[in-house]
């Protein structure tokens, strides 16, 4: 079977093998035994390969663990979704992704350890309202520098929001500088920056 | 280009897990044999995340 790392413009990308169809290519590893072991080493390897592919042009990372039976299936996959792939490649071209998480002690956590029923729902609403305020304070200044932004409110109890920003490479330094200045901008939360990443959050479900 | 960007790259395991298992291109149908067993992977890696803070990154 074939492991697929990413899809990108049709051009050589160093040592990574590729299967092309028209103007797009899938960057692959052939003859793998199956899906990779679900551990941090495998995740890091996938990420390193995809990150290195960005040197050669725009890429859309595949979801970790994507394997395909044979080369003809890869070609079909590319041919059937060519228009969508080309549009998404255009969207991410020249950009990298940054992530920012606002970690906090949620108002919901602070209420009590195990609020029940009505009190629980009120606490949850309060937490989401506070998280929205933090998005305005901490994420909006970063979104101004991004071409696209995704924000998820309260993905975990210890996180007010998790955001992903698609940022032009030319603005990457400015973006990082602004994000670091916001790290402790509010006493309610700490902003944690990550990246730059390949555009994982801006590739998405092609068939959804 | 990526050499410069990679130099100061910050990759935490929690962000790595979120992006690689929650993001990326997903192809539905029978072409893709597997996207691993994502739920299982997520659970096991989340447990790992709880005990590991930062993955030190030495980029090529």
Image (cartoon, coloured by chain):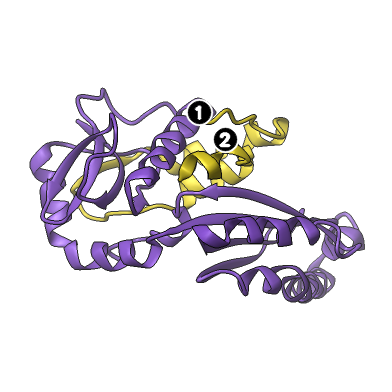
Chain colours: A purple, B yellow
Q: How many neighbours does mark 1 have within 10 angstroms: few (below 14), some (14-19), or many (20 or more)?
A: some
Q: Which mark is residue A196?
A: none
Residue A65 vs residue A7, the one in the foreground: A7
Label 1: chain letter: A
Chain assignment, label 2: B
Q: Is residue A120 above or below residue A196?
A: below
State if disc 2 and disc 1 touch (CB < 8 Å): yes
On the rendered structure, is A77 left or right of A158?
left
Q: Position of residue A33 (x, y in %)?
A: 26, 22
Q: Is residue A129 above or below residue A36?
A: below
- The tag on residue A39 is 1
Whether residue A30 sits left or right of residue A96 in the image: it is left
**Whether labels 1 and 2 share one chain:** no
Q: Read off the residue under disc 2.
A: B45
Residue at 21 percent across and 46 percent down: it is A11
Where residue A140 sits, quadrant-wise, is bottom right
Quarter holding the C terminus of chain A is bottom left
Q: How many marks?
A: 2
């Amino acid at each position: 079977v074939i492991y697929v790392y990413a899809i990108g413009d049709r051009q050589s990308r160093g040592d990574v093998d590729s299967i092309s169809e028209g103007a797009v290519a899938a960057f692959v590893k052939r003859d793998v035994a199956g899906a990779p072991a679900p551990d941090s080493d495998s995740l890091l390897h996938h990420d390193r390969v995809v990150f290195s592919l960005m040197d050669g042009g725009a890429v859309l990372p595949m979801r970790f663990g994507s394997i395909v039976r044979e080369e003809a299936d890869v070609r079909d996959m590319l041919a059937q979704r060519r228009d969508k792939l080309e549009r998404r490649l255009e969207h991410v071209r020249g950009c990298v992704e940054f992530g920012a998480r606002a970690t906090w002690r949620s108002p919901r956590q602070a209420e009590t350890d195990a609020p029940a029923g009505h009190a629980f729902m009120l606490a949850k609403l309060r937490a989401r309202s506070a998280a929205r305020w933090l998005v305005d304070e901490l994420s909006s200044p970063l979104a101004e520098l991004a071409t696209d932004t995704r924000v998820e409110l309260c993905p975990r109890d210890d996180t007010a929001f998790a955001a992903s920003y698609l940022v032009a490479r030319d603005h990457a330094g400015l973006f990082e500088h602004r994000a670091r200045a916001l790290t402790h901008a509010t006493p309610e939360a700490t902003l944690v920056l990550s990246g730059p990443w390949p555009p994982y959050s801006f590739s998405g479900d092609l068939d959804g | 280009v990526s050499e410069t960007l990679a130099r100061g790259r910050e990759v935490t395991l929690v962000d790595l897990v979120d992006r690689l298992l929650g993001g990326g291109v997903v192809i539905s149908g029978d072409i893709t044999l597997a996207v691993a067993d994502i739920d299982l992977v997520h659970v096991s890696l989340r447990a790992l995340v709880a005990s590991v803070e930062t993955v030190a990154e030495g980029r090529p």
